[in-house]
Each structure stands twice: as C-alpha cells, then as structure tokens.
Amino acid sequence: MRAASLVARRALVSGRGLRAAAPRQLAPWRCLTQTTAPGAQEKRDILKASVPHVASLGWCDDALAAGARDLGLSAAAQGQVTNGAVDLVAFVAQEQCEQLREEIDDAAQELAALDDWRDRLKLAIAKRLELSKPFHAHRAQAMGLMVTPLSRDDGAVPPADPPPAFEVLHRLVDELARATVVHEEALDVPEWRLRRAAAGVAYALCEVRALTDDSEDLGRSLKVASEVVDRFGDASEGPAALKQGLKAGAHAAASLGTAALSFLPGPAVGALPQLLDVFASRLSGGLEDVFELSLKKALKALPESPVPAPPGRAAPPAPEPEPEPEPSAK
C-alpha cells in the first residue's frame, strides 16, 4: 500500500509539469569540479578562503561570509556556495584526499619497507587522521554535514543528490588501500577487495571513535583502527578473512554503542537508538550483528575500482641529448 501511494505521488508530481529524475551515476565532487560553469572559479576561491575561519567559527555560513570578505567581496557573495557549509566540508575533504595522495606517494619507500600490508594500512590511516587534526574541535559537525544530501541544480525530482560522504568514502578507501600495494607482490582482485574493505571499516570506526577522543594525537582512535585492521586476514584464507575483519569492526562499533550515531543531525537520529535495540533483540548476536549487517551493506555500496599501481613519484623524463655540433666547413 505504501509503495503504491509513493508511485501515485510521483506520477502526480510528473503530471504537474516537473521532470522526474532518471537514475544516474554519481558525479563525484559535482559542485566543485565544474570549473567551466559560470561563477565556479569564484565559488572555489570563496571556499578556499573560508577554510582558515573554520577553526574559530565552525562549519557555517559565517565562515563562508568571512572568506568572501577576505577576497574583497560582499559577505552576500557566499550565497554562490549553493549548499553552504555542506559544500565547505566537501571541499576540505577533497583537498585532504589530494594531500593524502601526496603524502602516500612521498612515503613510498617507508611503506615498501613494511612487510605486512596491515602495517602499511595503519600508517596510511595515521596520516589521514593527522590531516583532520586542525578541524578536530568541529569533527561532529563536519560528519553531520557530510551525510546531508546535496541540493540539485537541474530541477529534477527528488531535489537532492546523495550526500558527499559517499564520494568521500569511495575515494578515501581507494587511497588508503593504495598505500598497501608494493612492487614485489602480485595483487589479485580478491586481495584488493579485502584491503579496500579493511580500509573502509577501520577508518570509518576510527572517525567515530575520534568524536569523543581527547587523547594525545588521537591515540585511542588509532588504536581502534589498528585492532580492526589486525583482524583482517589474507584473501588466500577465503571468505573467513573478510568475515573476521567485519566481526572485529562490528564488535568495535557495538562497544561504541549509540555514540556511533552522534555525528548525525538530530532529526536524522530520531528513534534510531530504539530501533537498534529492537533489531538487536531479534538477532542472536545482539548489537554486534546489527552493525555487522550494516558494514556489509556499506561495503557492497562502494563502487568497484581496479587494482592500482604502487605509491611513488613518477621518474622525471630523461633530458633530451644535446644535438651534436655540425662539422665545420673547411
């Protein structure tokens, strides 16, 4: 009955002259990478100028207005940032992905010297968490904004794109897992999938733990990630390798309890803690089974990606040889 009424409402909306949205692939960083669109470069400039104000003002329109003023623009110019603070968080997340890629490439020799891929992943996670430290005081606010759907600019229905968190997690998982690849090993697709799963589960739980982490250098958060990574086996062990890792992740999530929901906006949380308790009571493993199922679904939603080349800087092109001087005429 509910499904039928939903179809009827969509038909009614279409009949009023609004264009229904066709299924489409995600366009990562759509609001930030279309630099040829009118005003796109100015929008990027405002976002970049706003970042230094986040530490004192948080992720908000006031930070965007301050960034616009720094550029000599009216504070009202921040209205060009369509999704407000959501775009600001997504912009910083994009910049941090670029910085992480640079740091992983710079650490290629250090990573290659580690025998176990799990140790390489732990090092990469530590580097990513380090990049987040300047914004640690506003971490919960950022995570809440990251799960906020983006408004669409094409007039389609529904009037929102998926939250930036999907694109962020996809790219971040690939970058973290890329740090585990070395020249000396033949990495097949199953092993690559396993390492992506380990990266996604471990870092997601690391971020959740960081919400309430006041330890030096966020050591407690890194400890959670390290313990989860250590539970992942190798693909040669078959499905058990992934299962062990997911169970470790579910155990860590269950130990955090409803703190794992604290980054969501209040209206989004709603009755989720009560619903989790209901689901947990129906599963033999309780809350751990609930989180294990959730982790499996989240990993399934990640698009596939090919096995990448190992980290490292490309060798500069060899200089062209100097032309030999022509023999002088006698």
Image (cartoon, rainbow, N blue to C red):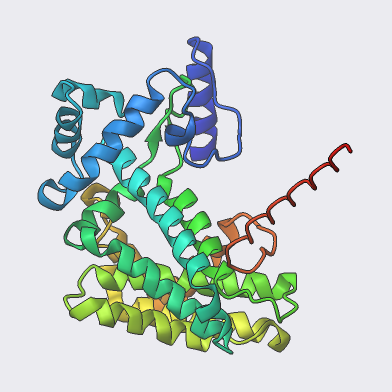
Asked which quadrant contains residue 262, the reply is: bottom left
Residue that sits furthest to the top in the current view:
17
Rendered-image quadrant of the C terminus: top right
Q: Is residue 186 left or right of residue 291?
A: right
Q: Position of residue 139 (x, y in %)?
A: 24, 59
The residue at the point 22 percent across, 58 percent down is 135
Q: Is residue 205 visible?
A: no
Residue that appears at 36% across and 45% down: 90
Q: Is residue 94 above or below residue 214?
A: above
Of residue 57 and residue 160, the one placed in the foreground of this image is 57
Where residue 122 sits in the image (x, y, percent)? 45, 80
- Residue 108, x across and y down, in percent: 54, 73
The number of numbered discs placed on residues in the rendered structure image is: 0
Q: Note whether 40 is above or below 14 in the view shown.
A: below
Expressed as whole percent of the image width and height from the top left, the position of residue 123 reads: 44, 78
Instruction: Residue 32: name its quadrant.
Output: top left
Based on the displayed image, in which of its 4 quarters is residue 261 positioned?
bottom left
The correct choice, above or below, for 267 with respect to 258 in the image is above
Q: Nearer the viewer, residue 91 or 109?
A: 109
Residue projecting furthest to the left: 56
* Residue farthest front in this picture: 330
Asked if residue 30 shows in the view, the reply is yes
* Image point (51%, 55%), residue name: 171
Q: Is residue 31 above or below residue 231?
A: above
The residue nearer to you, when weighing 72 against 222, is 72
Q: Relative to 204, is 156 on the left or the right? A: right
Left or right, 177 with respect to 60, comes to: right
Left or right side of 24 for 328: right
Looking at the image, which is closer to me, 85 or 45? 45
**Residue plotted at (21% across, 51% down):** 266
